[in-house]
Amino acid sequence: MKSDKKPYELDVLLKGCLHTEEMPDDRLHQRIMQEWKEDTDMKKKRSYKAAAAAIVCIGALSAVTVHAAMRFLTPDEAAEEMGYEEVADLFLGEGAIAVNETQNGKEYAFTLLGMTEGENLLSLDEEGNTIEKDHFYAVMGISALDGSPLTKEEFWDSGEGYFISPLIQGLEPWRYNIAAMDGGYAEIETDGVVYRMIDCDSIACFADREIYLCVLDKTLYEKDAYDYDEQSGVIAPNPEYEGTNLLFRLPIPEEKADPDKAAQYIEEMEKVQEGGGAAEEEEGTDQGAADFITNAGAASDYLTFLESLNGGEEDIHSVLEKMGMKVQDCQTAEEKDGAFLFEQKVEDGYVNSIQFFPDDFQDGSAYSFQYEESDEHAALTVELAEMNTDGTVTCTVYKKVYQN
């Protein structure tokens, strides 16, 4: 599929740049967080903990300003350049929305080019079939403030990375974001512009609320970056935050709202975040998480690990070693703001981050896991955190690779 659409012209960009609304300053409340590693190949990952858990987010400043004129790909062209032709077709469909709004961060200009919703084209079940649910897609163009060419290397080397995610009025942003909503992204560099396409669960059912897209400049949620008003549910950038904390409003038509579907989605999310997912068995086995793993060996190992947590007498580390899991890292977590932070550098310069809270250690330990899969192999990673007698927390990372 080749599009005959041309890059957006300057007059369209300027119209988007000058469109903004004032947003009130509200109070932020932070509760629990859950681990997520961004994936540039848009392979899906989910994180679960044995104890109460939620989401790792990141931080951002809102300034809508005109910067040096840029010529951008259209969203469908960007998706096609990334190799996702079916998603490109969605951006050419009737429900696609062109936005073309630019906001300037501290180092870069971020232009929300467009968004769409449609069939989930990027997540597959165990048999390789598309998972039957709608997804949200959005394309962001990232450029240098002075209009000079920008490379992916420069973009990633300049700071701690950027987290781009939908946020929903009335839902705690640290719990409901791309990290927990079957999310991921792909990224390319073309003609001096970095393009990122994100996808996650459909958010159209919440269209009777304010829906935002945040751009945050940290690898963890920065609690001073946004204000969250518990009464109104409004989310707004904190003007005193010194980094980049942009917030776009997404113009999803209100007639797409479905309160019943929204309530069901929230209920399912709460089940997952409270420990085990909707498919949790009576005995407490996290079967929902195992079902997400498509490699039979990885699923079997994961269930074996769960059994060791559910009243098993054998040392958990011994169980993991017998499974063939290898230690990748072991650190004492940093205590920060009443939580325990663990960060691990992984391939391509990414930092895998997780926070555990005191309530997570009901049995003296807590865990999260990641599952990754490519055409050649799959990998299961278990991050095991243990509370020590002196009140510190040790986090050990185990990993095993499986052939597909």
Image: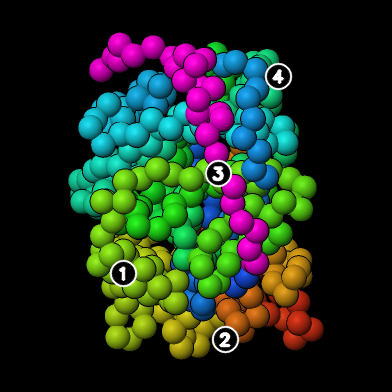
Residue neighbourhood size for the residue with mark 4, other residues' Cα within 10 Å, grouped as few (<14), some (14–19), many (≥20): few
User: Label 3 sits on what residue type?
Assistant: Glu
Range of magenta residues: 1-28
Residue 378: percent from left, percent from top: 41, 48
Q: Is residue 23 magenta?
A: yes
Of the image marks 2 and 4, the number of the one nearer the N terminus = 4
Query: From mark 2 to mark 4, how far is it between C-alphas?
Result: 52 Å
Residue bearing mark 4: 146
Query: From mark 2 to mark 3, how far is it between C-alphas?
Result: 45 Å
Residues under numbered marks 4 and 1 in contact, where contact means CB atoms less than 8 Å apart: no
| One can see residue 81 in this view | yes
Residue neighbourhood size for the residue with mark 2, other residues' Cα within 10 Å, grouped as few (<14), some (14–19), many (≥20): few
Residue neighbourhood size for the residue with mark 1, other residues' Cα within 10 Å, grouped as few (<14), some (14–19), many (≥20): few
User: Label 2 sits on what residue type?
Assistant: Gln
Near-viewer residue (180 or 282): 180
Residue bearing mark 1: 263
Residue 106: percent from left, percent from top: 73, 36
Name the element at disc 2.
Answer: loop
Residue bearing mark 3: 21
Identify the main secondary structure in magenta: loop
User: Label 1 sits on what residue type?
Assistant: Ala
Name the element at disc 1.
Answer: helix
Q: In this view, does 4 lie above or below 389?
A: above
Question: Which corner quadrant of the image does residue 97 belong to?
Answer: top left
Give the foreground label among 4 and 3: 3
Query: From mark 4 to mark 3, how far is it between C-alphas?
Result: 25 Å
Quarter of the figure with the N terminus: top left
Residue at 30% from the left image edge and 34% from the top image edge:
96
Residue at 64% from the left image edge and 30% from the top image edge:
65
